[in-house]
Image: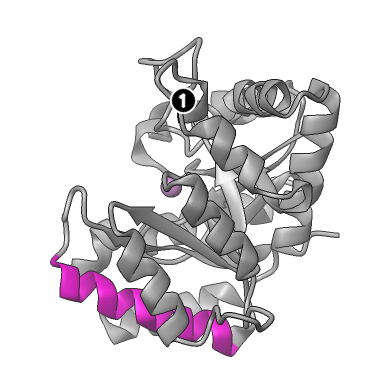
Amino acid sequence: MLFDSHAHLNDRTYAENREALFAAIEASDLSYVCDVGFDLESSLLAVEHAQKLPWCYAVVGCHPHDSKEMDESMMTMFKGLAKKPKVVAIGEMGLDYHYDHSPRDIQQHWFRRQLQLALELKMPIVIHDRDAHDDVLRILKEEGVLAAGKEPAARVLLHCFSGSPELAAQYVKLGAWISMAGPITFKNARKAPEVIAAVPDDRLLAETDSPFLTPEPFRGKRNSPVNVEYTVRKIAEIKGITYESAAALTLNNAKAFYGIK
Ligand code: NI
């Protein structure tokens, strides 16, 4: 019984064989998958998937890569989508200074606007942070989402966490949640045990970020939510608990974060 807390079933690489992907998910140990939007079109598709598939929930928003395409009319459409049934968070939003597909000031503007929308709608927030650790944390504080010594204004999830154990500890202290993806299974993932040790049992989620970040032993092939098993197995190994316990823990945390009953 597994929860893939972050996948892109809506990604065009699945367009040709999406029904086969759904069938594989239904035949697996997965109980839930969150289909995460990265622009307007993919968010619409995520909502459609959530409406037709009992195990699927949607997250709607704009990825920093796509923020150069954003405007206020799209924000209004995201707001409308966010109110649909089974839409459980806003995202994935944030900053990506690794690829810089959109100018940094534009990324920051739409990150702030989406944080404001999530606060207005009282919805959880899914964050993408690649090589932008300082600015992501600064903006979360400046927008009043996270503050030292206070309860967070919204639930915040750092998806595919790639920071240091110290940064993970800092986020946990501020009340945020941390999700680990396939790279923790890679042989050179030296930080992973320390990051996982820094996150309390009730704050840790697992994801695939499909179709990206395929875990070992399938690294190099296209990813699928079914492979969340390998990330959960690695979490179990690092924490010294059974696979079943790690599966239950990450599933329950994802349900709690997304507010799924
Ligand atoms: Ni993603």
Identify which residue is drawn at 37% across, 59% down.
Answer: 41
- Viewed as shown, does residue 9 lie left or right of 162? right
Q: Nearer the viewer, residue 184 or 116?
A: 184
Where is residue 192? Give x, y as percent.
52, 33
> The residue under label 1 is which amino acid type?
Asn
What residue would you read off at disc 1? Answer: 223
* Magenta-colored span: 103-120
Quadrant placement of the C terminus: bottom right
Whether residue 190 is visible, yes or no, is: yes
Q: Is residue 80 above or below residue 134?
A: below
Q: Quadrant of residue 142?
A: bottom left
Does residue 104 belong to the magenta stretch?
A: yes
Where is residue 60? Give x, y as percent.
50, 64
Identify which residue is drawn at 84% across, 25% down.
Answer: 244
Where is residue 89? Give x, y as percent.
59, 66
Does residue 130 belong to the magenta stretch?
A: no
Q: Nearer the viewer, residue 16 or 138?
A: 138
Quadrant placement of the N terminus: top right
Number of numbered callouts drawn? 1
